[in-house]
Image: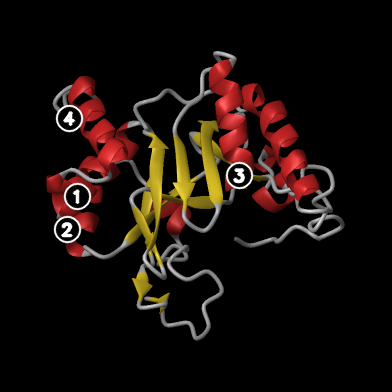
């Protein structure tokens, strides 16, 4: 991996510069975006092209798209997802405006929480010395904790789809928490959302993926506090089956 990116220290320096001051000068063009996508792929996150903003709408052809700039462009995104450097370079150069998604449940899962709860949990985890992996923030008030997946059974019939495995019947059990695993995806930074919003790294993909269970208790506790602060606005609400 370090051979592909000029050494892990060079990758860490570029990511640190991006996160500190925003974007390094080279990142204003395709080169910086491509470097960050390749860094995510080198960390084992399989990528596939996604839609992008077109003004305040989505670049897809669907009228009234419910998830503008947040979904793959191909129905075959699960089989299309790859960490192959050459393929990602081709996509990035031929589709310069495209966002990218990463398919979860293959190598990694994502614990997706409200932004306020995520900041509280991240502070507590770091103070406790817990190994926290890559973390992304989204301007639409979500925080994404990237973790190892819980396993990839040899028999695919043993795999449960994301909707059955990760969504309790109501939000009361894990208020505000979504666990993306098999059959799901999330946007991978750098990504653009309508209204000049972004999805960006708070902790880059140079951080090793942790076991999700080491984060889960702190995240669910923070989400419960967040739900309580909202006056129970989410209580009894059914979980969405599509993101």
The secondary structure type at the circle numbered 4 is loop
Marks 2, 3: nearer the viewer: 3
State the residue at coordinates (23%, 35%).
17
Give SS at disc 3: helix
Which residue reaches farthest right? 236
Marks 2 and 4, Cα distance to the nearest angstrom? 18 Å
Classed neighbour count for the residue bearing mark 2: other residues with Cα under 10 Å, few (<14), some (14–19), many (≥20): few
Q: 35 or 121: which is nearer to us?
A: 121
Dot 3 or dot 4: first in sequence order is 4
Q: CA distance from mark 1 to mark 3?
A: 35 Å
Q: CA distance from mark 2 to mark 3?
A: 35 Å
Mark sitting earlier along the chain (2/3)? 2
Q: Nearer the viewer, mark 3 or mark 4?
A: 3
Q: Answer whether labels 2 and 1 touch (C-beta < 8 Å).
A: yes
- Give the CA distance from mark 2 to mark 1: 6 Å
> Residue at the spot x=63%, y=21% of the render?
214
In the picture, the quarter occupied by the C terminus is: bottom right
Tell me whether circle 2 and circle 4 mark residues in contact (CB < 8 Å).
no
Label 4 and label 1: CA atoms lie apart by 13 Å
How crowded is the residue under tag 3: few (<14 C-alpha within 10 Å), some, or many (20+)? some
> Tag on residue 4?
4
> Residue 48 placed where, x, y %?
37, 54
Against 75, residue 174 (above or below) is: above
- Mark 2 = which residue? 93
Q: Residues within 10 Å of mark 4 (few under 14, many from 20)?
A: few
Q: Which mark is residue 89?
A: 1
Q: Choose the circle earlier in sequence order: 2 or 4.
A: 4
Comes first in the chain, label 4 or label 1: 4
**Callout 1 secondary element:** helix
The image's mark for residue 116 is: 3
Screen quadrant of the N terminus: top left
């Amino acid at each position: 991996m370090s051979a592909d990116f000029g050494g892990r220290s060079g990758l860490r320096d570029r990511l640190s510069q991006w996160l500190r001051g925003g974007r390094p000068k080279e990142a204003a063009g395709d080169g910086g975006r491509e470097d960050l996508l390749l860094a995510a792929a080198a960390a084992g996150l399989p990528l596939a092209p996604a839609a992008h903003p077109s003004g305040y709408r989505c670049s897809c052809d669907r009228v009234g798209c419910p998830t503008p700039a947040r979904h793959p462009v191909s129905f075959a995104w699960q089989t299309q997802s790859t960490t192959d450097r050459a393929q990602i370079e081709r996509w990035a150069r031929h589709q310069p405006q495209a966002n990218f998604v990463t398919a979860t449940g293959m190598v990694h899962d994502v614990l997706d929480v409200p932004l306020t709860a995520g900041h509280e949990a991240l502070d507590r985890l770091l103070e406790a010395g817990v190994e926290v992996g890559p973390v992304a923030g989204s301007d639409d008030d979500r925080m994404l904790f990237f973790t190892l997946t819980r396993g990839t059974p040899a028999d695919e019939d043993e795999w449960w789809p994301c909707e059955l495995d990760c969504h309790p019947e109501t939000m009361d059990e894990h208020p505000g928490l979504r666990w993306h695993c098999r059959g799901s995806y999330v946007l991978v930074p750098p990504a653009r959302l309508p209204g000049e919003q972004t999805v960006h790294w708070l902790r880059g993909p140079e951080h090793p993926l942790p076991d999700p269970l080491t984060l889960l208790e702190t995240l669910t506790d923070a989400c419960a506090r967040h739900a309580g602060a909202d006056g129970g606005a989410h209580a009894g609400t059914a979980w969405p089956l599509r993101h």
